[in-house]
Image (spheres, rainbow, N blue to C red):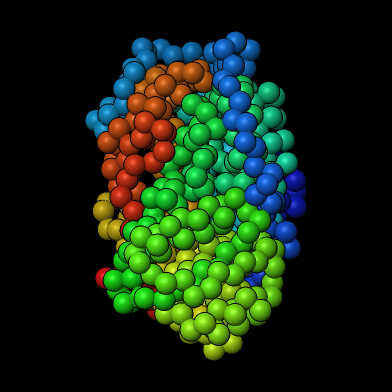
């Protein structure tokens, strides 16, 4: 049972994007981008807030369990004996419009798919209440507040971008509602508080290995750095790139910046080219990444490009075309994985949406399945019970691989390094 709480215009955009058509304009991924892709990083909330001890925001009456709760959720504990009388309300907040819609549309479709599969199993069912954060921190806060106070959700999933989560996350922490990030990779997300989780590998977990593998594979010695300096995610990615480059003993030929929402990168790319690096390392969101690739090749800058997590979208390949060939990026998931569960997910997602899933869809799908594992282990829709069960998830079989939460509520599973070959993401040899 899914309720979509969004403006009619947002719904129309979501339908268009899920149909798989891509616009001719590279500045508008998934036909939903706007000029302002994300709010500045300085809007991120530093004060995480403390969890409230009162139960005024709890959903104790949302669903009454008919079986006892368990504390630990190991790989073999499916929670299959649990039955709840009412659907568990799950708040879903993703960017279905504006710059991050290129990620959020696939995330929404994946969560809906996971919920449909779970509801078909019976025992425990899930009611998704979906909000569009419009790639805007203020909208993210509003969505969280409405879902928590009006809809009385038991748990939240999303928002899409780190800078939106930095603003909205403290709201969940204050009300004592568990919130799961499924694409938020900037450092500090889970430090908001003990109700905050994420199943997305952080840039700090992925970029160092990506840089090491790219350095070895390409024989790199001199590299240039380029990043957006007004977004929490891209700034975090740059800082980790910078540290990883130092650890590999690489020389930095130049460091250039731009703003999320920019469309002309000729000055920065010319400066990069003048210093003749062996490769260009970029921390950017998908919209800017596609433009950067195209403009770099147009200027004759044909060195390899190594990207951060923002490059993990087929939209980059669709929009940049041949310019995306050879791009290297670390990822939490690769479509080439051929295990039974992954094949079933890919098939079901393509049937539901008409397009192949990306990493963001895979992480969102996994996130909903992790939520279900916690709910069914606790056998309760109570917020605190779900939080405690989430914290205990260890060794769970998922399409991302064997998954556990760390003591800090971050994701613990093995990532991969990808390269764009013949118009798709392949594993780097």
Left or right of 401 on screen, residue 182: right
Left or right of 115 on screen, residue 173: right
Q: Residue at position x 40%, y 62% from top? A: 246
Q: How many marks?
A: 0
Q: Quadrant of the C terminus?
A: bottom left
Q: Residue at position x 46%, y 55% from top? A: 240
Left or right of 71 on screen, residue 194: right
Q: Quadrant of residue 51?
A: top right
Identify the residue at the far bottom of this view. Answer: 300
Q: Residue at position x 43%, y 42% from top? A: 199
Left or right of 404 on screen, residue 18: right
Residue 292 is situated, as x and y percent measured from the top left of the image, at 58, 74
Work out whether 186 lies above or below 246: above
Q: Quadrant of residue 166?
A: top right
Q: Quadrant of the N terminus?
A: top right
Work out whether 62 lies above or below 204: above
| Nearest the eye: 407 or 168 | 407
Residue 99 is situated, as x and y percent measured from the top left of the image, at 66, 58
Residue 47 visible from this viewpoint: yes
| Nearest the eye: 171 or 342 | 171
Residue 255 is situated, as x and y percent measured from the top left of the image, at 55, 69
Residue 133 is situated, as x and y percent measured from the top left of the image, at 67, 45
Residue 33 visible from this viewpoint: no
Q: Residue at position x 30%, y 50% from top? A: 414
| Nearest the eye: 361 or 118 | 361
């Amino acid at each position: 049972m899914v309720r979509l709480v969004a403006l009619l215009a947002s719904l129309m955009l979501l339908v268009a994007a899920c149909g798989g058509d891509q616009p001719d304009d590279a500045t508008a991924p998934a036909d939903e981008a706007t000029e302002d892709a994300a709010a500045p990083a300085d809007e991120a909330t530093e004060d995480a807030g403390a969890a409230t001890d009162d139960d005024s925001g709890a959903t104790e009456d949302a669903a009454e369990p008919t079986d006892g709760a368990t504390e630990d959720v190991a790989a073999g504990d499916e929670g299959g004996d649990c039955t709840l009388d009412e659907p568990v309300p799950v708040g879903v907040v993703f960017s279905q419009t504006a710059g991050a819609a290129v990620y959020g549309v696939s995330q929404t479709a994946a969560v809906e798919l996971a919920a449909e599969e779970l509801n078909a199993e019976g025992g425990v069912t899930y009611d998704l209440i979906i909000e569009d954060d419009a790639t805007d921190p203020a909208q993210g806060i509003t969505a969280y507040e409405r879902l928590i106070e009006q809809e009385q959700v038991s748990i939240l999933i999303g928002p899409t971008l780190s800078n939106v989560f930095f603003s909205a996350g403290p709201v969940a922490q204050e009300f004592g509602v568990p919130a799961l990030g499924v694409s938020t990779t900037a450092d500090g997300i889970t430090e908001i508080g003990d109700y905050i989780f994420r199943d997305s590998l952080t840039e700090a977990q992925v970029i160092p290995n990506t840089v090491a593998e790219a350095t070895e594979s390409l024989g790199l010695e001199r590299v240039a750095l380029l990043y957006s300096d007004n977004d929490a995610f891209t700034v975090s990615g740059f800082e980790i790139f910078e540290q990883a480059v130092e650890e590999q003993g690489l020389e930095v030929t130049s460091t250039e910046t731009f703003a999320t929402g920019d469309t002309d990168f000729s000055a920065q790319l010319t400066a990069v080219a003048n210093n003749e690096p062996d490769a260009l390392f970029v921390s950017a969101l998908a919209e800017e990444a596609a433009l950067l690739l195209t403009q770099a090749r147009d200027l004759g800058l044909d060195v390899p490009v190594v990207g951060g997590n923002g490059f993990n979208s087929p939209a980059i390949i669709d929009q940049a075309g041949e310019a995306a060939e050879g791009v290297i990026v670390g990822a939490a998931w690769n479509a080439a994985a051929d295990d039974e569960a992954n094949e079933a997910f890919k098939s079901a997602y393509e049937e539901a949406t008409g397009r192949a899933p990306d990493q963001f869809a895979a992480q969102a799908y996994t996130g909903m399945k992790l939520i279900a594992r916690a709910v069914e282990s606790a056998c309760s829709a109570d917020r605190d019970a779900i939080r405690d069960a989430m914290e205990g998830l260890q060794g769970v079989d998922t399409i991302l691989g064997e998954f556990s939460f760390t003591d800090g509520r971050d994701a613990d599973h093995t990532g991969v390094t990808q390269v764009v070959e013949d118009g798709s993401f392949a594993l780097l040899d």
